[in-house]
Image (spheres, rainbow, N blue to C red):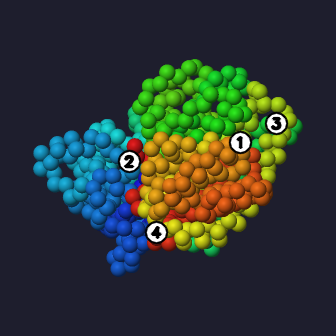
Amino acid sequence: MCGIVGYIGKREAEPILVEGLRRLEYRGYDSAGLATLTGNRLHLRKKAGRVSELGSFLQTSPAPGCIGISHTRWATHGPANDVNAHPHLAGTGNGQVAVVHNGVIENYLVLRRHLESEGVRFHSQTDTEVIAQLIACHMDGDLVEAVRKVLSLLKGTYGLAVVSPRNPDLIVGARLGSPLVVGIGDGEHYLASDPSALTGNTQKVAYLQDNQLCVLTSDEYHIFDAEKSRVSALVHSIDWTPGESDLNGFPHYMLKEIYEQPEAIENALRGRLSDADSSAHFGGLNLDVQQLRRAERIIFTACGTSYHAGMVGEYMFEEFARIPVEVEYASEFRYRNPPIDQNTIVIALTQSGETADTLAALRESKRKGHPVLSICNVVGSSIAREADGGVYLRAGPEIGVASTKAFTSQVTILALLALFFGRMRHLSSIQGARMIDELHAMPDLIRRTLRCQSEVQRIAEKYFHVDNMLYMGRQYLYPVALEGALKLKEISYIHAEGYPAAEMKHGPIALVDASTPSIFLVPRGSIFDKVMSNLEEVKARGGPVIAIASEGDAAVTDHVMSRADEVIVVPDVPEYLQPLVTVVPLQLLSYYIALLRGCDVDKPRNLAKSVTVE
Ligand code: M6R
């Protein structure tokens, strides 16, 4: 949440900062701002709204200088307006400081009251301003020392960057719980909350760890631990392909990412299936065979869409690996204290690898001595680095706030893991070989599924004006019902709920009326007839029904068609892979409905791509 970009070198900072902010805008888009330095003059420019608003403002009021820090905000304290936008300034003249900050300062009120009692005047409602005011108070010529002193007073989380005209040739950064990375160039350095901000500038990065502070000049960068000792950080090479995060002719990232799913699944599978032993293989699990064999229980922990993928994984692991699984919201799990037996593996699922609750759940599990794996998309992210081992999705950057390809990639990886654990236990080589064939077929089957686009668009035109929608599925498709509802509400602002179809009659069926469509996931399978009965119950109460059914068997399809108002057909696949094909029309439906309602599909209101606050 929120994005930070800093630059120090010989080039003008402003265009580099603005371009970096554009790349990070998916992390927060309430307001944006920057501060640059020319000698002992500080130039502050900030605006409520998108980075483009800041861009227009800079056209008339450019910010000169070859050093600067910038920020795109997702509001936590105080509304999104010009005053609350970062950077925040404090101090006067040469002693002025400018601060940008990601995270939450939990004790900011106590600190603020104390400063106010000493006569300090605050300008904003943010927690961040407290950091700026404190640094200004401690500033007696050495910015690094002043920042250091202030860090020890803060409770909460921060990734921050600070500049001051008193030390016009350096940027100070610090991290606790909110990611920060140093970009290493030739005669120039960068600071960013996410390496994607550095695309096109440098591929060499060094990640800060918690409780570390960094000092950047044009020619050098130094990283220090909490004891002021210099640490040598590993320099990573970022593997970005120029253009990977461009729209490539699509009107929105969400649509582009929906269409990238066949390729993302191909990438998730590549090199991980072995015909020789009818199993899956992973390079980075980092757990020995005995640890894996001993696993008596698996806990998936995640948030949002990743949580729904974990729920699909629960069904897969129980079916193929015969290991008891629990899926836990990371935000709950981190504060619970459930009895967990020794041979429990915790698996954190996350697209971004930076979700604060998931990271905290991972740390708590590690503290208790459990092996922790991650299934993660962003290489080098905090969760990927802190887990004992894990599997990367290889889905490429996901920019749209609504997660799409990360979900199908996570489900694919979970199928691979279920196969892997299954083959270590009860699954026969014949069953393993069959799963391998089924998985290999998925990319093309998703390509075929995408052909439903025009039918989905037609249905969206018919229903985009509704106020409520219900999503129903059972077994493997219950999580897909939840995911479909989440997609719709987050980008179209229509109230939507997902239920296990049979639960309807225990209460939610009271919501059914002629203006509340229900989406039923009824592909062929072992409980097809049961779900059809649930569908009939809704029809009998006058609720419009949109069914997602399997192609192939005319009798079955005709049966669904005769009962539902609309039918979208998807390829017929084994039940454990049905989440992959059924979620695609739901993603498209949300997309087209949101578009018809005039919503900002890629940047829905109140949201941000990566939720780095609790
Ligand atoms: O990056 P993560 O997978 O950890 O993110 C978890 C959720 O914040 C995320 O899936 C969120 O629910 C999406 N906006 C859903 O589309």
Residue 112, percent from left and from top: 20, 46
- Residue hosting label 4: 465
Q: CA distance from mark 4 to mark 1?
A: 35 Å
Say if residue 386 shows up in the picture: no
Instruction: Tell me: 569 left or right of 379.
Output: right
Number of other residues with Cα within 10 Å of mark 4, as a class: few under 14, some 14 to 19, many 20 or more: few
Say if residue 103 shows up in the picture: yes
Instruction: Tell me: 262 left or right of 232.
Output: right
Residue 21, percent from left and from top: 46, 63
Mark before the other along the chain sequence, 2 or 1: 2
Identify whether 40 is placed above or below 293: below
Q: Amino acid at mark 1?
A: Ser
The response on whether ligand 1 sits within 8 Å of label 2 is: no
Tags 4 and 3 touching, CB below 8 Å: no
What residue is shown at x 21% (from left), y 41% (from top)? 110
Nearer to us: label 4 or label 2: 4
- Corner quadrant of residue 386: top right
Res. 596 mark: none
Closest to the observer, 309 or 184: 309
Q: Amino acid at mark 2?
A: Gly
Nearer to us: label 4 or label 3: 4
What residue is shown at x 32% (from left), y 44% (from top)? 105
What residue is shown at x 72% (from left), y 34% (from top)? 320
- Residue hosting label 2: 103
Q: Element at badge 2?
A: loop
The response on whether ligand 1 sits within 8 Å of label 4 is: no
- Corner quadrant of residue 95: bottom left
- Residue hosting label 1: 526
Q: Amino acid at mark 4?
A: His
Q: Element at badge 3?
A: helix
Residue 529, percent from left and from top: 67, 46
Res. 431 mark: 3
